[in-house]
Image (cartoon, rainbow, N blue to C red):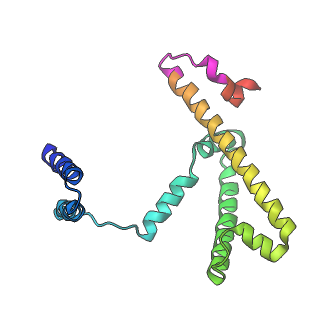
Amino acid sequence: MCGSRGRVVNIMTSENTNSAGSSAAHIKSVESLDQSNEMERGLKNRHVQFIAIGGTIGTGLFLGSGKSIALTGPSIIFVYIGVGLIMFLLMRAIGEMMYSDPSQHTFINFITRYLGRGWGKFAGWTYWIVLILTGMTEITAVSTYFVTFFGTFGIDLNSWKWLDRKSVV
């Protein structure tokens, strides 16, 4: 492992010392480092889907779903399935609209085109407000996890409890 790091350092230092032909030598050397690597570079559809799933599962989802299940019981799972199905169909519809008219870049452009400029501005501002509120929810969830996690080790985070909405109420 140290040998490979040494080769990378040597490549980088030789690039700094030789200015004329170093870029070709640098690229050739980096490619020679990848010859023994058997990993394939490139993302497939399933990789992108898992990245999207990971992006949608945030800290707030776990915090909110745990509280919802505790309050309503397992019937809330049917609500999650129903909302998920509606969101799936909505995303499919937006995908079809993007495929039929690739000149539109966002769903707000579609709203502006098909419903009017006023509705487009309303959707844009509403989306911006939702993003701000989502960020605040994520900060609240992270603070809840921090207070709980560090509290198990005896670290007092009472001065930071103002971030936790449960302690405010």
Q: Is residue 152 magenta?
A: yes
If the image is split into quadrants, where does the N terminus sit?
top left
Residue 36 screen position, x and y as percent: 16, 62
Report the front residue among 156 and 13: 13
Report the front residue among 72 and 151: 151
Tell me the residue at 55%/29% (across/down). Answer: 146
Report the front residue among 126 and 56: 126
Residue 169 screen position, x and y as percent: 77, 26
Q: How many marks?
A: 0
Vertical arrangement, residue 78 with respect to residue 74, above or below? below
- The residue at the far left in this view is 3
Q: Could you tell whether 43 is left or right of 77 in the image?
A: left
Q: Is residue 109 magenta?
A: no
What is the magenta range?
151-161
Vertical arrangement, residue 66 with respect to residue 85, above or below? above
Is residue 75 visible to the viewer in this orientation of the structure?
no
Vertical arrangement, residue 64 with respect to residue 120, above or below? above
- The residue at the far bottom in this view is 100
Q: Could you tell whether 168 is left or right of 102 in the image?
A: right
Residue 69 screen position, x and y as percent: 66, 43
Q: Could you tell whether 47 is left or right of 87 in the image?
A: left
Residue 84 occupies quadrant:
bottom right
Tell me the residue at 18%/61% (across/down). Answer: 29
Residue 9 screen position, x and y as percent: 20, 47
Is residue 18 visible to the viewer in this orientation of the structure?
yes
Residue 71 occupies quadrant:
top right
